[in-house]
Image: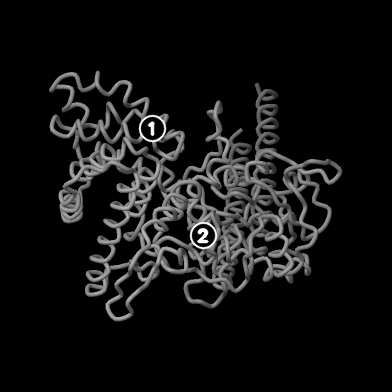
Amino acid sequence: MYTHTHTYTCISGSLSSVIMLISVLILTLFMSRIEASTREISLPFSFGSRSILRSVNDANKNGAEKPDYAVDLNATIFDSVLKESPTTYAIVEFFAHWCPACRNYKPHYEKVARLFNGAEAVYPGIILMARVDCASKINTNLCDKFSVGHYPMLLWGPPSKFVSGSWDPKQENNEIRSIDDGRTADRLLNWINKQMGSSYGLDDEKYENEHLNTNISDPGQIARAVYDVEEATFTSFDIILGQKMIKLETRASLTKFLQLLVVHHPSRRCRKGTAEILVDFDDLLANKKEVAGLSQKGVLGNYQICGKEIPRGYWMFCRGSKNETRGFSCGLWVLLHSLSVRVDDGESHMAFTAVCDFIHSFFICEECRQHFYDMCSSVSTPFKKSREFVLWLWNAHNKVNERLMKEEASLGTGDPKFPKVIWPPKQLCPSCYRSQNSKDNHIDWDHDEVFKFLNNYYGKMLISLYKDKEHLRDGQTGGVVVEDLAVSTNAVVVPVGAALAIAVASCAFGALACYWRQQQKSRKYKYHLHSLKNI
C-alpha cells in the first residue's frame, strides 16, 4: 500500500509541476505579447467618464494620431449609452474591422463626427455618432437585430429607438432609417442637413462666444440650455442644503423664489419637483427647531427638485473649455433670464424682488453677491411691466460681463475660448444696435428690439427642442433619461495577438485542469480498488 501511495504522490507531484511549468510559459508569452502590443498601439480609454459628450475617444497625448470622435460601442454598453444620450438623433455605423472599404470610409465618418462628438464639438448635443464592429463576436446578436447585411451600414434615428430595438428593411414607418447616400463625408453631411433643415459644413469651427455657436440661426443652440437650467436649479438647491443656509431669516427669500419657480420655470419636471417641496415647506418650517434640521440634507435632501434624472453631472450649452469656467454661473444666468421673460406685468416687481433676495441670501460668492445687491438697491421705482424687469436683468448681466472682462483680461483668469462679451453680439441681433462708437465701444441700443429678441431667445427658442421630449408632454411621467454615464464610452480594443494569447491560455488551462482531475479520479479509484483487495 505504501508503494501505491508513493507512486500516486509522485505522479501527482509531477503533473502539478508540469501544469505549473506550462502555466508559467503561457503566462509569460501572454504578458510579453500584451507589452509589445501596448508599445505598438496607444489605447485611450477611461472608466467612469462623466459624460458621453466629454469623454469620447480622447486624442493621443503625443499628437501622433488623429483622435477618434465616433463613439465605439459594443453589445454590453450599446443600450445604456444610447438610452442616456441627451442628443436628438443618433447615427450608428455597423462595420467590420477586417473590411477594407470600412477602413477607407472611417476618415469620412470621422470628419462628420468631429462636428457633433467630443469636448471640442462644433455642434454638441445634436447627433451622437457611434460605431459597432460586427466582426467582434460579442456584437453578433446586436448586428443581427439590426439586419446588418453589408459593411459599412449606417442607421439614423432617435437614440431611444435604438435601445432594445431592431431594424427591418422591409418594415415601413420605422423611426430608424437607413442612410443610403453617405459614402463620403460631404454626402453624409448633406443627408443630415436635408433631414434637419440645417446648413452644417465640414469646415465649420467652434464659435467662441459665451452664448452661441457658429450657426447663430440654429434654435438648438439655446434650446439645449434648458438642460443646463435644470442642472443649475438642482445645484442651487444642493448648495443651499449643503451649506446649511436655510434659517429663519432666509426662509422667506427661499419661499418666494420657489413660488416663482413653480409657476415660471421652463422645465415641467422642475415645476413639478418645486411644487412637491412647497406643499410640505410650511409644515417643515413650523418651528425653530425644525428649521435647523432642514439645513441638513436629510430632510429636504429627499426631495428631487427637478426629478430623478437630475443631476447629470455635466453641462451642455454652458460647458466651458476648463472645469472651473462657466458651468453653474452660466446656467444660473440662463435660469434668471428665462424666468424674467415668463412673468406677467403684474408679477414683474414680485419676480424682481424674489430674484434679488434669493441671490443676496444664497449666492455664496461674496463679491458677486454684493455687486448684484448693489444693482438691485439702485432700483427706486417698482416695476409695473415685465418689459422693465427683462431689460433690467439684461442690463445687469452686461454690467457684470463688462466688469469681469477687465478683471479677467488683467489677471488671465477667464475662459480663453469663451471670453466675456457685451450681449447680444451684433451678428446675432443686428436690429438691437442703433449705433456703436468705435472709440469707446459705447452702444446705442434699440430697447424695443432687445426686448423682442430676449423674449424669443429665452422664451420660445429655449424650449423649442426640449418640449418635444416625452417627459415634457402633459400626462406623461416617463421620459428620455439623460443621466451622467457611469460607464466609459470608449471601447477597450484588445490587440489580436493578445486576444489569441488569452484564448490559447484559457483553453490550455481548461484542458490541463480537466486532464489532471480525470487522472486524479482514475488513480484514486484504482488505489481504493487495490486497497479493498488487500483487506
Q: Is residue 340 left or right of residue 106?
A: left
| Residue 274 picture quarter | top left
Q: Residues within 10 Å of mark 1 (few under 14, many from 20)?
A: some
The residue beneath circle 2 is 45
Spot occupied by residue 348 in the image (x, y as percentages of width and height): 30, 40
Quadrant location, the N terminus: top right
Q: Nearer the viewer, residue 179 or 213?
A: 213
Query: Along the polypeptide, which appears first: circle 2 or circle 1?
Result: 2
Q: Nearer the viewer, residue 414 or 475?
A: 475
Q: Amino acid at mark 1?
A: Val
Q: Nearer the viewer, mark 2 or mark 1?
A: 1
Residue 180 visible in the snapshot: yes
Q: Which mark is residue 116?
A: none
User: Looking at this rendering, what residue extends furthest in the bottom direction?
Assistant: 439
| Residue 414 picture quarter | bottom left
Q: Residue at the spot x=44%, y=55% of the render? A: 453
The residue beneath circle 1 is 263
Q: Is residue 507 left or right of residue 403?
A: right
Q: Nearer the viewer, residue 432 or 40?
A: 432
Spot occupied by residue 222 in the image (x, y as percentages of width and height): 48, 54
Secondary structure, mark 2, is loop
Q: CA distance from mark 2 to mark 1?
A: 44 Å
Q: Residue at the spot x=26%, y=40% of the render? A: 349
Q: Amino acid at mark 2?
A: Phe
Quadrant location, the C terminus: top right
Secondary structure, mark 1, is helix
Q: Residues within 10 Å of mark 2 (few under 14, many from 20)?
A: some
